[in-house]
Image (cartoon, rainbow, N blue to C red):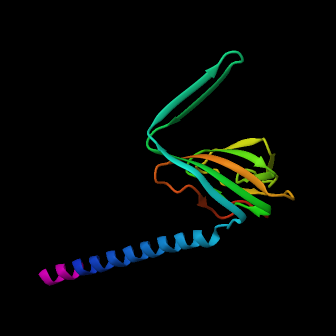
Amino acid sequence: MPILARSRRKLRSLTSKWILALVVGAAASGVYAADVLATPSSGLSTTILAQSEFNSFFAEGHAFPPAWRAVMAAYGQTDVYVVDNKIDPGGTTGWHTHPGPSLILVVSGQVTNFTSEDRNCAGHTYTAGQGFIDGGGNDEHTLRNNGTTEAETIAVQLIPHGAPRKIDEPNPTRCPV
């Protein structure tokens, strides 16, 4: 019996190692496939103007009249970035997401924001002086400069401490952009 018990243990150990090898191989293939399928940016120049780390915070502002109120909170260490993006005519950021929200200010030119939620690929165009919010998380999007001059945006991003600022994604829609 001791020989049979040892053989079974060796077989279980060998089987466990093969299963582990298959799981690790599948995971590595998935990471490689995600990198291959990611849509690269083109005609994009990115400069980080400032970066700071904040502790947990809660901020509230209000003014009367008119009735106006703003509330902002972050729980846990937060990295805040101020990012200058310049996009050539026809250029794109590539499909991506961020782990936290961003306020996007269009400084010059125009950008069209395409989101994974818009199955019609209509996009929404913003011009100099306008802005929008990128909710982050699962909000996959790409910005494209469909204008004839360089577009510039400034993004203020709140990101969980140590997380990547931008995560490239494959095109989640049937959009040609």
* Residue 152 image offset from top left, x and y in percent: 74, 53
* Residue 86 image offset from top left, x and y in percent: 72, 57
Which residue lies at the image location 77% right of the left edge and 41% below the top edge? 130
Left-right relation of 153 to 79: right
**Magenta run includes residue 4:** yes
* Residue 89 image offset from top left, x and y in percent: 82, 61
Q: Quadrant of the C terminus?
A: bottom right
Which residue lies at the image location 30% right of the left edge and 80% below the top edge? 14
Which residue lies at the image location 27% right of the left edge and 80% below the top edge? 11
* Residue 27 image offset from top left, x and y in percent: 48, 70
Mainly helix, strand or loop, the magenta region? helix
Whether 109 is drawn above or below 7: the answer is above
- Report how many numbered discs are placed on residues in the image: 0
- Tell me which segment is drawn in magenta: 1-8
- Is there any visible trace of residue 1 in the rendered image? no
* Residue that extends furthest to the front in the rendered view of this protein: 49
Left-right relation of 164 to 68: left
Which residue lies at the image location 59% right of the left edge and 57% below the top edge? 166
Q: Quadrant of the N terminus?
A: bottom left
- Is there any visible trace of residue 88 in the rendered image? yes
* Residue that extends furthest to the left in the rendered view of this protein: 2
- Foreground residue, 64 or 174? 64
Whether 74 is drawn above or below 141: the answer is above
- Foreground residue, 41 or 123? 41
**Magenta run includes residue 37:** no
Asked where in the image residue 88 lies, by quadrant, the reply is bottom right
Whether 157 is drawn above or below 86: the answer is above
Left-right relation of 109 to 15: right
- Foreground residue, 15 or 100? 100
